[in-house]
Amino acid sequence: MTDSQHNDVVVLGAGVSGIYQIKRLTDLGLDAIVLEADEDLGGTWYRNRYPGARFDSESYTYGYSFSKELLDEWHWKERFSPQPENLRYLNYVADKFDLRRHMRFGARVVGMSWDEEGRRWHLHLQGGETRTARFVVTSVGVLSIPALPEYEGLDDFEGDAFHTYWWPKEPVPLAGRRAGVIGTGATGIQVIAEIAGQVADLTVFQRRPNWSTPLNNAPISEAEMDGIRARYDEIFANCASTAGGFEHLADRRGFWNVSREERVALWDRLYETPGFALLAGNFPEIYFDEAANREISDYVADRIRRRVNDPAVAEKLIPKDHGFGTQRLPLETHYFEAYNRDDVHLVDLRETPIERFTSNGIQTSVAHHDLDLIVLATGFDAITGAFDRIRIRGTEGRLLSDKWRDGPSTYLGLLTHGFPNMLMVAGPQSVSGSTNFPRAIEGGVDWVTALLAFAYEHGHTRLEVHAEAERDWVEEVKRIHEGLLLRRSRGWFTGYNANVAGHGAGRVRYQAYFGGAPRYAQFLARAAAGGYPRIEKS
Ligand code: NA7
């Protein structure tokens, strides 16, 4: 045991949000430190090194907006930048602003308990070290706890097997190998499209297909980048004005006010437009009107049929259990064409389930698939998983994981009653999980920073949100959720992952706020106005 060290603020996690949070706190002159469990910074972009990992957000909408100098210096090389470049970017930011000196790596916080008398948090690190902090800001990520499937014999497999999140730093040989991919979410779809043709043979084990539309990636030349730099103010203003935090503007003509031909003309154009165009540039009715949603779903299904040669395979790739845009939409590059290759095979796990892993492959109910490499793209214990991994004890010794057993309960995703002085950036029930991540976390970090500045200015050493304010927010989260077709979907947005105990049982966890970025920003502004009236301060 080493002696306890104290800071004004401890930030948990050095990913996209932790990096910006420490910048703002140290600019304020607070004594703040980031504790990061990994051996370096970057979070999602440090971890996810699997082939094909890249942004689905336009790169220039993903970068930080806080520094004009940074915006002027950085050249995004591709419209949707790949993982190695994204990690370089985050390192560049940390080095440019000299933030590493405020970060400690290999520092995993496993417990945190509130000391009412001392008005501080006691933090317990793996290895026995303890520290204290007046305030703790969690920036632990929404997709930072991978979920492994519970197949029999998982450990018997003697080839290489990796969850995509834990993909090794050293290159994994692909040429000449027989690969299997389990999972067809955003990650699986990126991996499959990337390694098809690189490996000798690829078998995709699909439980449920996802809707997916073309990414339409392209390089960004120097001249284009100059144009983007000149437009940054407009780009960020556009992002702030749209529900998803992207530049794509929804079509407000009214789904039923235009003819079917006009709708299809729009969709034809959006299908060829980069990024989430077909999702975010569409008629808002597709999110809540069943008939509208059916029509766009049929349109995207036809697109899939046109791209996949074998009609039986095409049908298996078309979701039948959820409509377009009601789960997180994966974006793809020649994904559907991969299935036209002789060396790519689709196994439908609903027809022929996996029975077990063997020493040299996967046994389904009808066949054994010989494999050298298995890619587990099986998703995450999303949004609340990272909180559950820390034993967080609030007032009266109550555990946060007990409070949130049936789903999180927060005020704006930023605070939770009974856990004073704990602030969450990208917390559950914020828009961070449901919109363009950096755009959302900048708003969250700025809000948290302003609250802390307010507290220090007024000499407050204890901040706790009123229970009633939290109830009101949870009601808002539920009300928005229930008005959308996504309420019936089974993706991580709504808290489902059958690999996480209790999260696949058909019970919705209101984990994210789907009211959109502008509405959320209004709530943030109102919450701060008049000196944070719904937060008890002393
Ligand atoms: P997702 O979107 O949660 O996808 C996980 C996929 O893995 C999904 O297709 C699952 O099928 C499948 N899965 C999970 N467990 C199993 C088992 N046991 N057997 C077969 N298939 C399984 O995670 P991603 O990593 O793709 O994406 C997460 C986010 O990262 C993404 O949205 C981006 O924001 C970045 P299911 O649908 O449950 O039937």
Image: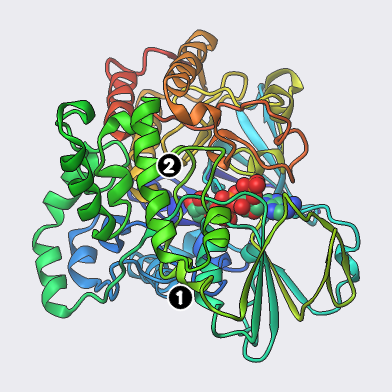
Q: Which label number is shown at residue 193? A: none
Toward which corner of the image does residue 38 lie, by quadrant?
bottom right
Pointers 2 and 1 in contact (C-beta within 8 Å)? no
Q: Position of residue 367 (x, y in %)?
A: 83, 67
Residue located farthest toward the front when viewing the structure as drawn: 311
Q: Which label number is shown at residue 84? A: 1
Provide the secondary structure element on which disc 1 rests: helix
Q: Position of residue 39 (x, y in %)?
A: 62, 68
Decide: few, some or many residues near mark 2? Use Cα within 10 Å; few <14, some 14-19, many ≥20.
many
Toward which corner of the image does residue 174 lie, by quadrant?
bottom right
Q: Is residue 156 visible?
A: yes
The residue tagged 2 is 324
Q: Earlier in the sequence, mark 2 or mark 1?
A: 1
Q: Position of residue 498 (x, y in %)?
A: 72, 42
Residue located farthest toward the top when viewing the structure as drawn: 468
Q: Amino acid at mark 2?
A: Phe
- Give the residue at x 50% y 66%: 190
> Does label 2 point to a residue whose CB lies under 8 Å from ligand 1?
no
In front here: 31 or 346? 346
Horizontal arrangement in the rendering, residue 165 relative to residue 470 (left or right):
right
Q: Is residue 526 above or below residue 468?
A: below
